[in-house]
Every structure is written in C-alpha cells, then in structure tokens.
Amino acid sequence: MFDSMGLNETDSAIGDNCAFVKGHLEDVESKSTKLVPTSCSQTLGRGEMLLSGKTAIISGAASPRGIGLATARRFVSEGARVAILDIDGAAAEAAAKSLEPISGEAHLGLACNVADRESCAKAVDAAAHVFGRIDILINNAGISQPVKLLEITSSDWDRIQDVNLKGVLFLSQAVVPHMRQRKSGSIACMSSVSAQRGGGIFGGPHYSAAKAGVLGLAKAMARELGPDGIRVNCVTPGLIGTDITAGKLTEEMKAKILEGIPLGRLGEAADVAGIYTFLASDLSAYVTGAVIDVNGGMLIH
C-alpha cells in the first residue's frame, strides 16, 4: 500500500483526507443538530424552570431542617407542584402550606405511613386525583438507630427495614401505574453512604442492610421499568446536617469527621436537594440505575 501510494504523495493524500473528514463532520454536525429533541433544547434554554408543569410526591418531607422539605422547596422554585407525605399528617399539611403556590395552585400535605401498603396507595391516589398526574417520586422517608450488632432486636430490625426498604417498595408500587399511563416518570430513592462503607455514625448494621437493599431494589426497578419510560436512580448522602443529626455531634466528633472529608465541611440538605432536582428533571433523561454520591469525598470509590 505504501508503494502504490508513494511517500512523496503523503502531503497530498493527507490534504484530501482532511478535506473529506472536515466535510463529513460538518454534515454530521448539521444532521445531529436536527436530531436534538425540542424538549431537550427547551430544558437547556436559559431562564427555563427545570420542573415546569411537573408534579412530585416526596415522602418524609415535613421536618423543618430535613432533606425532604429542602427538596420540596427546590422543586417548587423550579416550577413543580408538590405533595408532601409524612407520617405526621398535620406537619405535612403545615409544610405544604409553607410552600409558594404555583400559578395560584396550592401544594398538598398528606398523612402517609410508608411502611403500610394501603396508606401509600391512599396517599398516592389522593395526589393523583388533585394533580391529575404524577411525574416524580422521591422516596426520601427513612429512620435510623445507632446500635451495635449484638444489640439489634427482632423488632429493631423489622422497624428499620419496614420504613427504609419496604417504604420504597410500597410507595413505588403505588406510583408506577400512574407513570406507566403516561410512559414517563422519574423515581429517586434515598440510600446512604452507610450502605457502601458498612455502617455509619448514626446507623447500626441493620440500617446499613436496609440502605443496601434500597440500592439493589432501585437498580432492579430501573431495569424493569425502563421500557415504560420510567427512570429509577439512587442518592447516597454522607453526613448531612438535618434535624436527625442536630445536637448529636460534639465539636470533637465533628472535627474528627471533617478530617476524612476532602471538601472540609458537612453536607447540607440543599446539597442533596440539588441532586434530586437533577434526577427529577429532563437533564438526566438518559440516566437510570445510577447511584450518585453526595458525601463531600468521604467515600471515593
């Protein structure tokens, strides 16, 4: 091949090839521009609200300093109507009333025990009746218990599993039929760095087991529900400053923890809310079965 081309023809050949490649790339660029969906272009446009016209259900979202309420506020700022679910119905209603209405439409606060299948179905049906659709589910509700392995009782195990793992299953089961009707939806599930590193500061082994179960469940749901246009992802926060952690960290404990966090600070509820917003929006339209760490580098793997 080299003989037939001739070494003295190299410059000419390269020039011809470059011209061909340049023309080909220009043609591809022109065609690819036409292939970008209008919705994607609108999502990326300046001034567009990421969740405009969408509706969301967020569990465990009544706590004033919690991740759930921070997420609700962020969603509302991006144009979504929100249904706040909490085992404390009065607190859920108060939290919903604290949110800015969307085009004059108020948000919902509903009592829901995520560990009870019927309670989940009732709350989801109520939200769907008012909103007319369910676009987003944030499986945020969770509880923890800082006990050692040999201290875990059968009732301790059941309680942690029921809320943290069964709750994800039951609420997802209630929401999925509504999403399937529209062939669209996003589900984000709260796991934890404890599921990845084996234990945490405020959670025992049964908490780690439940949160690891959430990872597996979410990935299985992502695979099964993908053909229905439903995306499912997980968020794994590190140590976040919420009502659960407030008052439990001494300055000495905090200083020791910060030594292992490259970003040099504890997380805030807004940090997790930002990731939930990304996963709920069309910016993550090709993301499913993913696990996103929000831990400041506490665990890099």
Image (cartoon, rainbow, N blue to C red):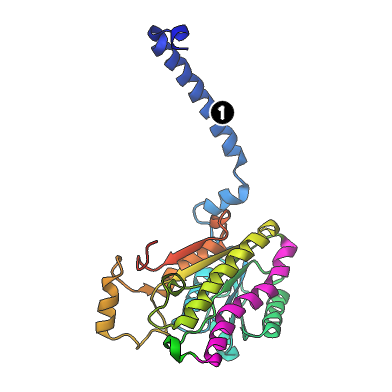
Magenta residues?
A: 153-182
As for residue 246 lying within the magenta part, the answer is no
Q: Amino acid at mark 1?
A: Asp
Identify the residue under disc 1.
27
Residue 43 % position (x, y) = 55, 54
Residue 98 % position (x, y) = 52, 81
Residue 210 % position (x, y) = 53, 78
Residue occupying the far front of the picture: 150
Please indicate whether residue 268 sits to the left or right of residue 1 in the image.
left
As for residue 172 lying within the magenta part, the answer is yes
Res 215 visible: yes
Instruction: Label 1: state its secondary structure.
Output: helix
Q: Nearer the viewer, residue 146 or 283?
A: 146
Q: Nearer the viewer, residue 124 or 148?
A: 148
Q: Residue 252, relative to residue 277: is it above or below?
A: below
Q: Residue 67, relative to residue 218: is it above or below?
A: below
Quarter where residue 108 is shown: bottom right
Name the dominant secondary structure of the magenta segment.
helix
Q: Residue 180, relative to residue 123: is it above or below?
A: above
Residue 182 % position (x, y) = 72, 62
Res 53 visible: no
Residue occupying the far right of the picture: 181
